[in-house]
Each structure stands twice: as structure tokens, then as C-alpha cells.
Image: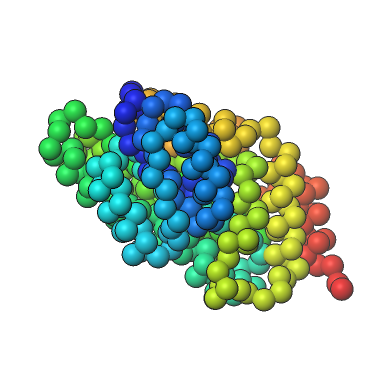
């Protein structure tokens, strides 16, 4: 996609992080915006900012883990603007801890937002985009799903998050192939960021009451602290990542990375698979970090 002026963008998780930065860039390029987020006050602030900047905005408070709410977002988009040209299925939550310590409610919440939210977005918007492509040979559409580097490797003490993001990668790779069977006008892309300060480590603020998992375990506290620290050390901002997404759309690149230099563990994992090796030590290049994690998890009291 080379041009964005006058086109329509739908963005979930639009009130903060990657979603907000994508909305800001889209507004600067003359796009009409559909903003969706579960946090009403943050969504109101984002909407006011973008309208002040001159963008035409439709805002909806949406829980993407609920298919009906995503379907209603698609219907509102069609009614207000028509078929979108860019759909950014981005809403996500963070969670960590040892796999066996993850409560059922935590699995349901994280997979509901991170994986099913993307699936519901694909299901709701793709048919609309395909209809637009059939009606107009000049129509171009892009679906960008936010996964993570944790969707390409399996860092320890992050099981539920890894599972959700691997699912997004698999879904999006399949979507890319499925779309190629039926059209050349709608394309899929997957965003796999590394640690970037976005506010996702504070996503518990939007945890629904029925997803409460009780007091966090030691492993969950450790995971939260390590993810927070890693994000704070990042030299890449959410705005930088948004710019990379738009560059990838212009260049028609499927995989979008915030930190291309972090791909070495992905190569190692693929070699483990193809060479029938046991999973490699994720801390081979950072043994001190591995020792720190082991010590924290084995501590008593």
C-alpha cells in the first residue's frame, strides 16, 4: 500500500502504546480513524487529541475478547465510513509466570484478548474488505496483527503469553496464504515487537473482575519485574515501531520487527526443530540473567 490519504484505518488497543502511535501516524497521513479500546478514559483522551489534530474519528469502547463487540465495531465502521483499508488488530495484555501456576481464569483472559481478539477482528473485517476489493479493482487492504517476538521463540516463565502470541503468528501466516488464494488486493502482515515500553506490563488495570487469579505467585511477580525492566531499557519507542509498520506496508513486507537484531534466538529455535535437538538454553548468551531468574524462582520465603 503506497498511499494512505483519505483511506480508513481501524485500530484496536488504540488508546495507548502501538495503537495510539499508529493512530497518530495515520492521522498525519490523512486517514479516517476508527479507534477501539477497552479503557474508556484513555480512549476519550486519544479521541480528543486526534480530532484536535484534524482527523475524522469514530471511537468505540470495545472488549475484543467478546465476538459480538467486535462484530458491532465492524458494523459501525461500515455504517460510518465503509470498508476499511487498514485493520490493526493490536489490543493485547501481558502476563507471565510458570505455566503450571497460571490459573484457568488467566488463560481465558490472556487468550481471549491476545488470540481470540485477533481472530474475531479477522473474522469481522476480512469479508468486508474482500467485498470492497471485488467492487473496486483499485481497492487495497491490509490487515496487521500484533504478535510478539514471544510468538517466534519460547522464553521461560512467560508460558501463557507465549502461547497467545504463537497463535497470532500461526493465524496470520495462514491468513496470508488464505488471502493469496482469493485476491491480490488484501494482504496480511504480522508485527513481532521485542521489549518496547507500551504500558502492556500494566494491563492488569483492565483485567475484568471475573478474570481475577488471586494473589500473584512468586514466578508471576518475577516475570512482571523482568518485563518491566527490559521495556525500560529499550532504545526503541512505540512511535518507532509504528513508523516501521507503515514502512512495511509500503514495501509489502509480511514480518515486521522492532528489533531485527533480536532474531538470532529464532534461528536457533528453527535449528533445534530441524536438527532434532532439545530446546537450546535461552540464556546461552546471557548466563547472568539465567542465573538471576533461577535464583529468584528458587528463593524461599
Nearest to the observer: residue 46 or residue 167: 46
Q: Is residue 169 left or right of residue 45?
A: left
For the point 74% across and 47% down, the residue is 229
Nearest to the observer: residue 149 or residue 126: 126
For the point 48% across and 53% down, the residue is 37
Q: Is residue 119 above or below residue 25?
A: below
For the point 19% across and 28% down, the residue is 138
Nearest to the observer: residue 259 or residue 78: 78
Which residue of the protein is positioned furthest toward the left in this rendering? 135
* Colouring chosen for the image of the structure: rainbow
Q: Is residue 82 left or right of residue 280?
A: left
Tell me if I can see residue 166 in this picture. Answer: no
Q: Is residue 131 left or right of residue 230?
A: left
The number of numbered discs placed on residues in the rendered structure image is: 0
Query: Dividing the picture into quarters, in which one does residue 217 lie?
Result: bottom right
Which residue of the protein is positioned furthest toward the right in this rendering? 301
Residue 143 location in percent, x, y? Answer: 35, 42
Image quadrant holding the C terminus, namely bottom right
Tell me if I can see residue 229 in this picture. Answer: yes
Residue 222 location in percent, x, y? Answer: 75, 60
Residue 219 location in percent, x, y? Answer: 72, 65
Q: Is residue 287 above or below residue 294?
A: above
Image quadrant holding the N terminus, namely top left
For the point 65% across and 53% down, the residue is 201
Residue 152 location in percent, x, y? Answer: 51, 48
Amino acid at each position: 500500500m503506497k498511499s494512505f490519504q483519505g483511506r480508513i484505518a481501524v485500530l484496536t488497543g488504540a488508546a495507548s502504546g502501538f495503537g495510539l502511535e499508529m493512530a497518530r501516524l495515520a492521522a498525519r497521513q490523512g486517514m479516517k480513524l476508527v479507534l477501539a479500546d477497552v479503557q474508556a478514559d484513555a480512549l476519550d483522551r486519544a479521541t480528543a487529541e486526534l480530532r484536535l489534530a484534524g482527523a475524522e474519528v469514530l471511537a468505540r469502547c470495545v472488549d475484543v475478547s467478546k465476538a459480538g463487540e467486535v462484530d458491532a465495531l465492524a458494523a459501525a465502521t461500515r455504517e460510518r465510513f465503509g470498508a476499511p483499508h487498514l485493520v490493526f488488530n493490536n489490543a493485547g495484555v501481558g502476563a507471565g509466570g510458570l505455566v503450571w501456576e497460571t490459573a484457568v481464569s488467566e488463560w481465558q483472559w490472556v487468550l481471549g484478548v491476545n488470540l481470540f481478539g485477533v481472530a474475531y477482528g479477522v473474522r469481522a473485517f476480512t469479508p468486508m474488505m474482500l467485498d470492497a476489493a471485488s467492487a473496486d479493482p483499485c481497492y487495497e487492504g491490509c490487515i496487521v496483527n500484533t504478535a510478539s517476538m514471544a510468538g517466534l521463540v519460547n522464553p521461560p516463565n512467560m508460558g501463557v503469553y507465549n502461547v497467545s502470541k504463537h497463535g497470532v503468528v500461526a493465524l496470520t501466516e495462514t491468513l496470508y496464504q488464505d488471502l493469496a488464494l482469493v485476491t491480490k488486493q488484501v494482504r496480511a502482515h504480522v508485527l513481532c515487537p521485542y521489549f518496547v515500553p507500551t504500558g502492556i506490563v500494566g494491563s492488569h488495570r483492565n483485567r475484568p473482575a471475573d478474570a481475577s487469579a488471586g494473589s500473584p505467585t512468586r514466578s508471576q511477580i518475577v516475570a512482571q519485574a523482568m518485563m518491566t525492566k527490559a521495556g525500560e531499557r529499550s532504545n526503541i519507542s512505540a512511535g518507532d515501531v509504528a513508523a516501521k509498520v507503515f514502512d512495511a506496508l509500503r514495501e509489502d513486507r509480511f514480518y515486521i520487527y522492532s528489533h531485527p537484531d533480536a532474531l538470532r534466538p529464532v534461528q536457533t529455535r528453527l535449528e533445534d526443530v530441524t536438527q532434532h535437538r532439545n530446546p537450546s538454553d535461552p540464556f546461552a548468551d546471557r548466563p547472568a540473567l539465567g542465573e538471576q531468574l533461577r535464583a529468584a524462582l528458587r528463593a524461599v520465603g
